[in-house]
C-alpha cells in the first residue's frame, strides 16, 4: 500500500486547460460520479492514470472532462477571480475528488493544506475552514444564478461536508405542442381545382411555427429581464434588516480597545469612549520605543484603529447578501459613530461591549449581558432573570479544557423604534464567528425563527444565546442554550 500523495493545488488557468497530471508513485485516479437529480441512475466514467516515481508532467495531453471544464469556467468567473482564497479552496477539494481522494477531504486537512495551519491545529478555535466554505457555497450559488445559468452540470458543496458534488441540471419543461388547427369544412367548389394537401396545411404550419417562435422569444426576454432586475429576496429576518434602497449601518469592533482593556485591566465605558479621555497622551512622542512606559504603550494601543479578521469576513458576507435584497451597506469604525447614527434606519453591531461600546445602549433591555473579569481571566454571560433550571451566568474561562465559548444574537428595535438592530457578539472572536455562522445559515436559523414566529408569520424581536463546544477534539457544534422574546 502506497503512502498518501500530497497533490499540488492547481491554478484556475491550469484547471481550465484540463488539469495537468503529475507522476509520483503507482496510484489510480478515478473520475467522480455525475448524479442526475431526476433519476436514480448514476453515470460512472472511470479513467485510470498510471503514476510513476519521477515527478514529471505527462507527455500526452490530459483528458478534459465536463466536470473539469466546469470548474475552470467557475474559477475564471468574476466572483472567483477576485477571491484567490476561495479559488484555492475550490481547486483543492475538486482536485482531491478528481484524484479519487474525496475520503481525505475534511476540515483538518483543508486547514493545513489550503490555509497554512499546522497539521494539529485546533479547528474548534480557528474556524477559518467553516467560514470560507460558507462563502464558497454562496459564491457557487451566485455563479449558477448568473454567469452559469446555462450550465448543464451543477457543482455544489453540501452543508456538513466539504466534498464537491456534481449533478445534472434539471432540464426545463418543454413547451406543450400546439393542437392542430383544422379549417372549417366547406362544400367543394367544382369550378376550381382542390389544392394539394401539403399546400392546404402550409399556412397553418407557418402560423403555428411563428407562434412558437414568438413564445420562445418572449420567454427569453422575460428571463433576461429577471436576471437584470431580480426581485428582492423575502426572508423573515434579513428582509427587515436589509431594506430595498435603504442603507444599513455596520459597526465592526474596535480591536485596539480590546487590547487596551487587556493591558490596562480597566473597562472603558461608552461615555469615556465617546470623549476619548482614555486616549489622552502625556507625551507628544508616541510609537514603539524601547524606553516607552507601560502607560505610553496602553495609550498607543488605544489610539490604533484595528478590527478583527472575523469582522471583516462578516462584512464581506454581508456585502454579497445585500445584493439579493437590493440594499446598501455603510461600514463605519466604532470610534467614528455618534448616537444619532443609531436612531434611524437599521444597524448591525459586531462584537461585545468591550470591543464595541455601542452595544451598551441596547444592553439595558437585554436579559443576557456579557462581563469580562480581567483579573480572573473569565468572560461570563450574565443571566439577569434566570428561568427555572437556568444558571445565573455562563462562564468561558481561558483555561477551560473544553474551550467553551458563548455567542449572542440579539435582534432588537433601533434606538428610535423606527428600525431594527442586530447585535452579533461572543466571549471571544471565535464566539462572534459562531454567532454569525448561526444567523447566516438558514439551516440553523430558520428552525428557530419558525419556533418563535407569530401566527401571521412575522418574527418578533429576540435574543438568542448559543454555545460552541469542542466535540471529539476537532468538530464544533453550536447549540441553543437559552433565548428570550423582547416583544
Image (cartoon, helix red, strand yellow):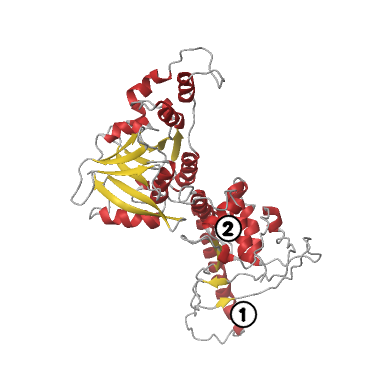
What residue is shown at x 62% (from left), y 56% (from top)? 91
What residue is shown at x 49% (from left), y 22% (from top)? 297
Q: Residues within 10 Å of mark 2 (few under 14, many from 20)?
A: some
Q: Which residue is tagged 1?
A: 199
Inspect this view and state whether residue 459 appears.
Answer: no
Depth order, front residue of 284/4? 4
Depicted 398 relative to depicted 267: above or below: below
Q: Secondary structure at mark 1?
A: helix
Depth order, front residue of 277/122? 122
Depicted 3 relative to depicted 356: above or below: below
Q: CA distance from mark 2 to mark 1?
A: 44 Å
Whether pointer 2 and pointer 1 mark residues with C-beta atoms closer than 8 Å, the reply is: no
Q: Viewed as shown, does residue 56 lie left or right of 96?
A: right
Residue 446 figure quarter: bottom left
Where residue 199 appears, as percent x and y from the top left, is 61, 79
Where residue 133 appears, as percent x and y from the top left, is 51, 53
Q: Residues within 10 Å of mark 1 (few under 14, many from 20)?
A: few
Where residue 345 appears, as percent x and y from the top left, is 35, 35
Residue 367 figure quarter: top left
Closest to the camera, between mark 2 and mark 1, is: 2
Tag on residue 239? none
Depicted 234 relative to depicted 25: above or below: above
Depth order, front residue of 13/58? 58
Tag on residue 148? 2
Residue at the far left: name it: 388
Q: Secondary structure at mark 2?
A: loop
Amino acid at each position: 500500500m502506497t503512502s498518501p500523495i500530497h497533490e499540488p493545488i492547481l491554478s484556475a488557468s491550469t484547471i481550465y486547460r484540463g488539469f495537468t497530471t503529475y507522476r509520483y508513485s503507482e496510484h489510480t485516479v478515478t473520475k467522480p460520479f455525475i448524479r442526475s437529480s431526476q433519476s436514480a441512475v448514476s453515470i460512472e466514467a472511470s479513467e485510470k492514470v498510471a503514476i510513476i516515481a519521477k515527478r514529471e508532467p505527462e507527455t500526452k495531453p490530459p483528458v478534459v472532462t465536463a466536470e473539469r471544464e466546469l470548474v475552470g469556467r467557475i474559477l475564471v468567473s468574476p466572483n472567483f477571480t477576485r477571491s484567490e482564497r476561495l479559488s484555492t479552496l475550490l481547486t483543492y477539494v475538486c482536485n482531491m475528488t478528481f484524484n479519487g481522494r474525496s475520503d481525505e477531504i475534511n476540515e483538518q486537512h483543508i486547514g493545513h493544506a489550503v490555509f497554512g495551519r499546522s497539521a494539529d491545529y485546533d479547528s474548534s478555535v480557528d474556524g477559518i475552514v467553516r467560514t470560507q466554505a460558507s462563502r464558497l457555497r454562496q459564491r457557487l450559488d451566485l455563479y449558477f444564478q448568473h454567469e452559469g445559468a446555462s450550465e448543464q452540470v451543477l457543482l455544489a458543496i453540501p452543508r456538513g461536508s466539504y466534498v464537491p458534488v456534481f449533478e445534472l441540471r434539471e432540464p426545463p419543461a418543454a413547451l406543450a405542442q400546439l393542437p392542430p388547427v383544422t379549417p372549417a369544412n366547406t362544400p367543394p367548389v367544382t369550378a376550381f381545382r382542390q389544392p394539394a394537401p401539403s399546400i392546404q396545411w402550409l399556412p397553418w404550419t407557418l402560423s403555428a411555427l411563428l407562434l412558437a417562435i414568438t413564445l420562445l422569444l418572449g420567454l427569453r426576454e422575460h428571463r433576461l429581464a429577471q436576471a437584470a432586475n431580480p426581485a428582492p429576496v423575502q426572508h423573515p429576518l434579513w428582509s427587515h434588516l436589509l431594506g430595498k434602497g435603504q442603507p444599513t449601518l455596520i459597526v465592526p469592533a474596535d480591536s485596539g480597545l480590546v487590547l487596551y482593556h487587556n493591558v490596562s485591566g480597566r473597562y472603558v465605558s461608552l461615555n469615556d469612549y465617546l470623549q476619548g479621555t482614555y486616549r489622552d497622551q502625556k507625551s507628544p512622542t508616541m510609537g514603539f520605543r524601547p524606553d516607552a512606559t507601560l502607560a505610553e504603550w496602553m495609550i498607543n494601543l488605544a489610539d490604533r484603529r484595528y478590527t478583527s479578521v472575523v469582522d471583516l469576513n462578516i462584512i464581506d458576507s454581508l456585502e454579497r447578501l445585500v445584493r439579493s435584497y437590493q440594499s446598501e451597506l455603510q461600514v463605519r469604525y466604532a470610534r467614528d459613530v455618534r448616537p444619532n447614527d443609531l436612531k434611524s434606519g437599521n444597524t448591525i453591531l459586531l462584537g461585545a461591549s468591550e470591543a464595541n461600546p455601542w452595544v451598551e445602549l441596547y444592553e439595558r433591555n437585554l436579559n443576557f449581558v456579557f462581563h469580562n473579569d480581567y483579573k480572573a481571566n473569565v468572560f461570563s454571560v450574565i443571566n439577569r432573570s434566570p428561568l427555572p433550571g437556568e444558571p445565573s451566568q455562563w462562564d468561558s474561562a481561558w483555561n477551560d479544557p473544553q474551550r467553551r465559548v458563548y455567542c449572542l444574537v440579539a435582534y432588537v428595535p433601533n434606538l428610535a423604534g423606527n428600525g431594527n438592530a442586530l447585535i452579533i457578539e461572543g466571549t471571544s472572536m471565535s464566539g462572534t464567528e459562531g454567532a454569525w455562522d448561526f444567523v447566516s445559515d438558514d439551516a440553523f436559523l430558520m428552525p428557530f425563527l419558525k419556533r418563535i414566529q407569530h401566527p401571521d408569520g412575522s418574527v418578533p424581536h429576540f435574543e438568542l444565546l448559543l454555545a460552541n463546544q469542542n466535540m471529539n477534539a476537532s468538530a464544533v457544534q453550536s447549540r441553543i442554550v437559552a433565548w428570550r422574546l423582547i416583544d
